[in-house]
Amino acid sequence: MVKSAAVERWFASTKPPSEAALRRVRELILGADPSMRERIQYGITFSSTKSGDFAAFVRYSESGVNLRLMRGRRLHGRYPHLEGATVKRMRIADEKEASARAVELRSMVKEWCALGDAASAKATARRTAASGRPRRKGEP
C-alpha cells in the first residue's frame, strides 16, 4: 500500500474532526488493490488508478466521512451503503462503522480497478487490430 506524503501533510494541516475514520477508509481503499494511489487536488484527497479517479473525501470539515465516488454509476455490484442516483457517495459515521464496511469498500475498489483493466485491455485490442488491418488507399 502506497501512502502519499502530500496526503499525510494534508491530514497534519487540516486536522479533520473524523481523522481516525478518514484514515481507516483511506487504508481500506489503498489496501484493496495495488494500483490504487492517492493525491491532493483542489484541497481534497483523491484515490485513483491510471484509469481515473475512484473517490474523494468531501465535506471533511464536518464529522463523519463523506466519500464521493467520481464515476460511481459504473459500479454494478450490490453495495447497500452507496447512496445517490447520479452522484454516488457513501457516508460513514466513525472508525468503527468504516471497519464494519470494510468488505463493501474493498469490493467497490476491486470492481472499479477491474473496470479500468477491462477498458485498458479493450483499447489495446483495438490498437492491435487497427495496426494489423490492410491500409486503405491514401493512408500513409
Image (cartoon, rainbow, N blue to C red):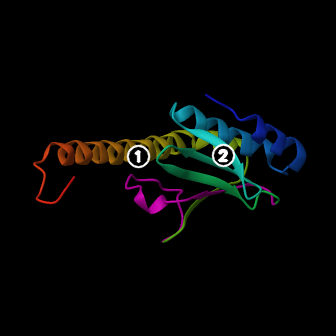
Look at 57% across and 32% down and name the residue there. Answer: 31
Q: Position of residue 90 (x, y in %)?
A: 59, 57
Element under disc 1: helix
Left or right, 12 with reference to 98: right
Q: Which residue is mark 1?
A: 116
Q: How many other residues sit within 10 Å of disc 1, few (<14), some (14-19) or many (≥20)?
A: some
Q: Quarter-wise, where is residue 96 in the image? A: top right
Q: Position of residue 64 (x, y in %)?
A: 75, 54
Look at 13% across and 51% down and name the residue there. Answer: 135
- The amino acid type of the residue labelled 1 equals Gly
**Residue 34 sits inside the magenta stretch:** no
Quadrant of the drawing holding the N terminus? top right
Q: Which residue is mark 2?
A: 97
- Real-space Cα distance between discs 2 and 1? 28 Å
**Residue 64 sits inside the magenta stretch:** yes
Look at 26% across and 46% down and name the residue there. Answer: 127
Q: How many other residues sit within 10 Å of disc 2, few (<14), some (14-19) or many (≥20)?
A: some
Q: Which residues are magenta?
A: 62-85
For this rendering, which residue is in front, 42 or 13? 42
- The amino acid type of the residue labelled 2 equals Glu
Left or right, 75 with reference to 101: left
Q: Position of residue 34 (x, y in %)?
A: 52, 30
Q: Earlier in the sequence, mark 2 or mark 1?
A: 2
